[in-house]
Image (cartoon, rainbow, N blue to C red):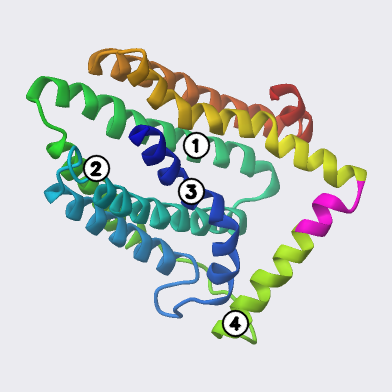
Amino acid sequence: EEMGMFVGALFAPWGLKWMFGPVVDLVWSERLGRRRGWILLAQTCMVLGLLASVGIDYTTQIKTFTIVMVGVNAFCALQDVAIDALAVASLKEDERGLGNGLMFAGAYIGQALGGAVMLGLAGRIGSLTPAFFVVAGMVAAVTVFVVLPMREAPSPQPKGRGIADVAREVGNYSVTALSGMLGSVRGFAAMALALLPAGAMAMGLALQTALAVELGLSDDTIAALALVGSIVAASGSVLGGLIADKVGHRKALGVYL
C-alpha cells in the first residue's frame, strides 16, 4: 500500500507538465536564456532535493521522503518541458525523430544507472544512501559541463510576461485542449491514442515496482531485469527515431503502436 502511494505520487508531477508549458514560454531571464535558465533552475533544485533526502530514513519517514521526492520529480518534469521546447526550437523536422530517440535513450540509460545499478550496489553494501550522492553528482555534472557552457539563439520578447498573462495562457490552453479532444471524431481518436497504448505503458511503469516487491523478487533480480529492460528500450528509442525520420513520423508511430 505504501509502495503504491509512493510510486503514484512520484508520477503525479509528470501529469501536470502541460501547466508548465505556458510558464516556460512566457517567463525567462534574458541573461540566462529562454530555455537554459529553466533547465539550470530545475537541475539545481533536483540536486538540492536529492542531497536533502539523504538524511531522511525512508523506512520510518515515508511521508517526508515522498514529499521530497515529489518535489525532485516536479523539477525534473519542469526540466523535461524546457528541454523539449529547446529541442523543437533547435532541430529541423527531419532531425526530431533521432533527437527524440536519443533523449529517451538518455532517460533509459539514466534509469539504468540510477535505478538498476544503484539497487545492485545497495544490495551489496546494505544501504541506498550512496545512490543519492551518485545520482546528485550525475545531475550536477550535466549542469556544469553541458548546461552552463550551452548558448541559446536569442528569442523575440513576448508582450506580456506577468502572472496574469501566464494564468491566461494556461486557461486558454486548457479550453483549446479540451475542445480539441471532445470537439470532433479526430479529437476522440487522438485522446484514445494517448490513453490506451501510452497510458498502458505508463501504468506498467507505475506498477512494475510494486509488483516486483509483491512477487518477492530480490534486489539483484529487480536490478537485472531493470538493467536489461533499460538497455533494450534505449536501443529501440534510437533505432525508432532513425526509422521515423526516414519513413515519416506518423507512419512510424502507427506501426510501432
Residue 181 position within the rendered picture, expressed as x and y whole percent measured from the top left: 80, 50
Q: Of the two numbered discs 1 and 3 on the same chain, state the one appearing first in sequence.
A: 3
Of tags 3 and 4, which is closer to the observer?
3
Q: Is mark 4 on a helix, strand or loop?
A: loop
Q: What element carries label 1?
A: helix
Label 1 amino acid? Answer: Phe
Closer-to-camera residue (233/70):
70
Which residue bears the numbered disc 3?
Answer: 12
Q: How many labels does the image show?
A: 4
Of tags 4 and 1, which is closer to the observer?
1
Identity of the residue drawn at 57% across and 25% down? 239
- Does the image show residue 84? yes
Q: Which residue lies furthest to the left in this view?
A: 125
In this rendering, position of residue 224 left or right of residue 48: right
Tell me the number on the disc at residue 135: 2
In this rendering, position of residue 81 left or right of residue 3: right
- Does the image show residue 156? no
Of tags 1 and 3, which is closer to the observer?
3
Most frequent secondary structure within the magenta stretch: helix
Tell me the CA gap for discs 4 and 2: 36 Å
Residue 94 position within the rendered picture, expressed as x and y whole percent measured from the top left: 69, 42
Label 3 amino acid? Answer: Ala
Tell me the number on the disc at residue 104: 1
- What range is drawn magenta here? 178-184
Closer-to-camera residue (138/118):
118
Contact flag, marks 3 and 4 (Cβ < 8 Å): no
Label 2 amino acid? Answer: Val
Q: Within 10 Å of the Cα at label 4, are there few (<14), some (14-19), or many (20+) other Cα atoms?
A: few
Label 4 amino acid? Answer: Gln
Which residue bears the numbered disc 4?
Answer: 157
Of tags 4 and 2, which is closer to the observer?
2
